[in-house]
């Protein structure tokens, strides 16, 4: 049953190709256009480009997860999952599938962009790892926001969840600076992994509770 639920959620998102190809293409266009807006002779520090990557990724993930629960809510699928006591699993698989089809591809596109800027290989690898991890955190929190605003429009959910993501952006910036300066960054990376594990374990339960309140 578990494998079937995962396959169903993966198939449903894969069939809606615009929902996962669109965000990746938008992000690709952003990273291609961004260098064109800068002076070629300017010596911008790596932090500028990497901060741009974090924020752009957050915005694109926001677009990719906007309808994560809407279709199932409208066609009554969520009610069936509540009756069968599988709602938490379904929420977890929805987040996982969005991370696989949107979050990880975005991380690799950003990795190629960072390599094209002739940054050090170590910085590029650390950026890739942190993007893969942070994208899962982004998807969890933005899914929480979308569950809160299921009947009220996406703005309410964003206003609630974005403040929780600002400390994460600060953490990513601190870790980037540590790598560039040659300092020990493993503490920041460990904290990032810890946040990912906590968020991935608890947010699906919170989302399932919120979805149940919408359906009562």
Image: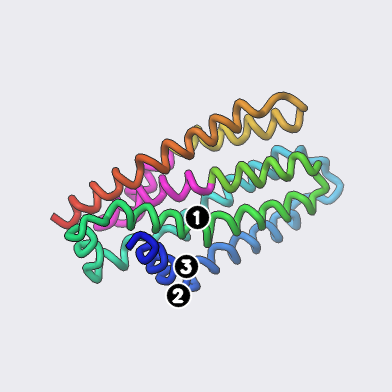
Label 2 residue SS: helix
Q: Position of residue 100 (x, y in %)?
A: 52, 58
Dividing the image into 4 quarters, which one contains the C terminus? Answer: bottom left
Relative horizontal placement of residue 7, taking residue 179 as reference (left or right): left
Q: Residue at x 83, y 44 (%)?
A: 42
Q: Residue at x 75, y 57 (%)?
A: 36
- Asked whether 32 or 100 is in front, the reply is 100
Dividing the image into 4 quarters, which one contains the N terminus? Answer: bottom left
Q: Which residues are magenta?
A: 135-163
Distance from label 2 to label 1 (Cα)? 16 Å
Q: Residue furthest right?
A: 41
Q: Residues within 10 Å of mark 3 (few under 14, many from 20)?
A: many
Mark 2 and mark 1 lie on one chain; the one further toward the N terminus is: 2
Q: Main secondary structure of the magenta part?
A: helix
The figure's colour scheme reads rainbow
Residue 43 drawn above or below residue 36:
above
Disc 3: which residue? 19
State the image quarter where residue 175 is shown.
top right
Disc 2: which residue? 15
Disc 1: which residue? 99
Mark 3 and mark 1 lie on one chain; the one further toward the N terminus is: 3
Label 3 residue SS: helix
User: Residue 33 shows which numbered tag?
Assistant: none
Q: Position of residue 101 (x, y in %)?
A: 52, 62
């Amino acid at each position: 049953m578990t494998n079937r639920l995962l396959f169903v959620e993966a198939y449903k998102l894969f069939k809606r190709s615009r929902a996962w190809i669109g965000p990746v293409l938008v992000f690709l266009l952003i990273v291609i256009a961004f260098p064109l807006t800068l002076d070629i002779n300017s010596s911008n520090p790596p932090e500028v480009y990497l901060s741009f990557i974090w924020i752009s990724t957050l915005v694109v993930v926001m677009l990719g997860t906007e309808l994560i629960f809407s279709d199932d809510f409208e066609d009554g699928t969520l009610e069936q999952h509540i009756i069968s006591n599988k709602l938490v699993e379904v929420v977890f698989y929805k987040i996982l599938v969005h991370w696989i089809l949107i979050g990880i591809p975005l991380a690799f596109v950003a990795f190629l962009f960072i390599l094209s800027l002739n940054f050090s290989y170590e910085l590029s690898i650390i950026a890739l790892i942190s993007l893969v991890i942070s994208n899962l955190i982004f998807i969890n929190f933005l899914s929480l926001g979308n569950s809160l605003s299921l009947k009220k429009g996406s703005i309410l959910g964003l206003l609630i969840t974005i403040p929780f993501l600002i400390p994460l952006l600060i953490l990513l910036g601190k870790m980037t600076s540590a790598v560039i300066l040659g300092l020990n960054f493993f503490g920041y990376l460990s904290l990032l992994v810890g946040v990912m594990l906590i968020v991935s374990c608890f947010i699906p339960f919170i989302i399932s509770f919120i979805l149940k309140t919408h359906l009562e």
